Amino acid sequence: MRSRLARFTERKEHALDTLRIQDLHYRSWGPVDLDIAPAECVCLSGPSGSGKTLLLRAIADLDPHEGSIVLGDLECRETAAPNWRRRVGLLPAESQWWDERVGDHFPSVDEDRLTHLGFDLDVLGWSVSRLSTGEKQRLALARLLSNDPSALLLDEPTASLDPDNVSRAEAMIASYRREAGAPVLWVSHDPAQITRVADRAYRMHNGALTRQE
Amino acid sequence: MGVITLSAIDLVLATALVFLLAGASAAMRLGVGRRLVISAIRMTAQLLLIGLVLRTLFAHARLGWILAMAVIMLLVAGREVMARQQRRFRGWWGFGVGATSMFISSFSITVLALLAIVSPDPWYQPQYAIPLLGMLLGNTMNGISLSLDRLTQSAWEQRAVLEQRLMLGATSEEAVCRIRRQSMRAALTPTINAMAAAGIVSLPGMMTGQILAGSPPFEAVKYQIMIILLIAGGAGFGSMGALFLASRRLFDARHRLRLDRLTAPRD
């Protein structure tokens, strides 16, 4: 477990990284060009099958793609893939858990973060099989943030949460993005949520982005 | 002590048993009769053929001929490993992963056993070399096909978990570690079970054969012990090699899970 100070300085080093996507082609789609400034939140909506999830997967380098993706001075192609994915953290719509207990999945534990998401430390001893869909979604967010990513790719991070927990998760993401200076790309189907959290919003259709005002 | 030779009538009696079983299966609509008869006929033809081949081979013990025989056995075993996969690798890899690891493990262990343990003269004397290689290939083939089938099947079923681990920054090696361990265990389970039951529940086939052929039981037992240990080594190292190659092939250099490298399953 790393100390908070170590994490803080590490974050400082990486601070103010812009996520720059240029001429990105994935599957049969593209080109996508998108710049997300440090601490900026860009929302993405669109019908299912329009390529939102695949775009996030391409940015996290989980699928083959062409074009350039740069975070700060880090070029995706030139960075070891596991490092890239720790820096550009992808939260999938449905989280997966492979070990017996919740705590086994966390590289380090930030108690404040769990509290802010409505858990206490006991949760780390819970068996994964008793987690509800909503609990899994909130814990997956905490697990992702414990990697200290420099940019966030969120695929409907609050889809199965009740209104209270939606606000908790939104507040957590907002404070993380400000503290870490992390660019955020957020897929959401909820127009009210987009209004609340987005600095910019795009609609996706057949892999192409249209700016929404 | 000589061997009691079997006459054609003796074999017909044994054959009648299989036809009786096929008839019973048809009467009870179990639907396995046809396949049973076809397999029995195929097995008889294959064994008669190998009997002829071995007779010729024993008469002319030349290294070249024995190697040719060994290569044919290997190719057939490689094809068999490929045929037993629900989801196998596309292209050359489907055959290559199994055949390569089988080749390295079975051939080197057979040569080791011939040179260092049994030491016949010449070392490639077919009476020893061919049965040894056959037993090793057969068991290595089972181990490898079990391990590969388990690995590719688990990777397919658990692709979401594998990718989740990659998303969190795991290397492909870390992500695949668990299913590879399970696959290795699946590969070695038959061998470990056979060792546990050997001599108590079952009398192993080779030992039984030697005893029927008139060998002193203790000599037969020593041979059997050697064979079982060699088989454990062959199946173990063969599966390990196959799992090493296959688990690398499941991912690319960017640590992406590449299930597109597998074929769709056949039912």
Image (cartoon, coloured by chain):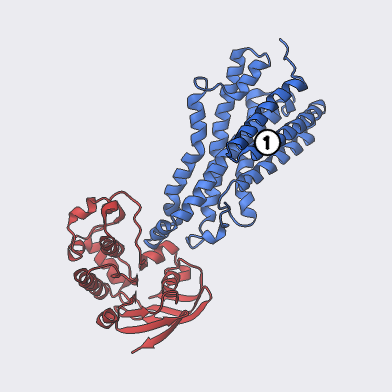
* Position of residue B214 in the picture relative to residue A171 (left or right): right
Q: Which residue is mark 1?
A: B37
Q: Which chain shows up in red?
A: A
Q: Is residue B73 visible?
A: yes
Q: Chain of mark 1?
A: B
Q: Residue B147: x, y in percent?
A: 52, 44
**Image quadrant of residue A203?**
bottom left
Toward the bottom, the furthest residue is A213
**Image location (x, y in percent) of residue A198:** 29, 81
- Picture layout, residue B115 above or below residue B147: above
Label 1 residue SS: helix
| Residue at the image position 23 percent from the left and 51 percent from the top | A126
Query: The N terminus of chain A is located in which quarter?
Result: bottom left
What is chain B's hue in the picture? Answer: blue
x%, y% of residue B140? 59, 37
B122 sits to left or right of B210: right
Amino acid type at image mark 1: Val
- The C terminus of chain A lies in quadrant: bottom left
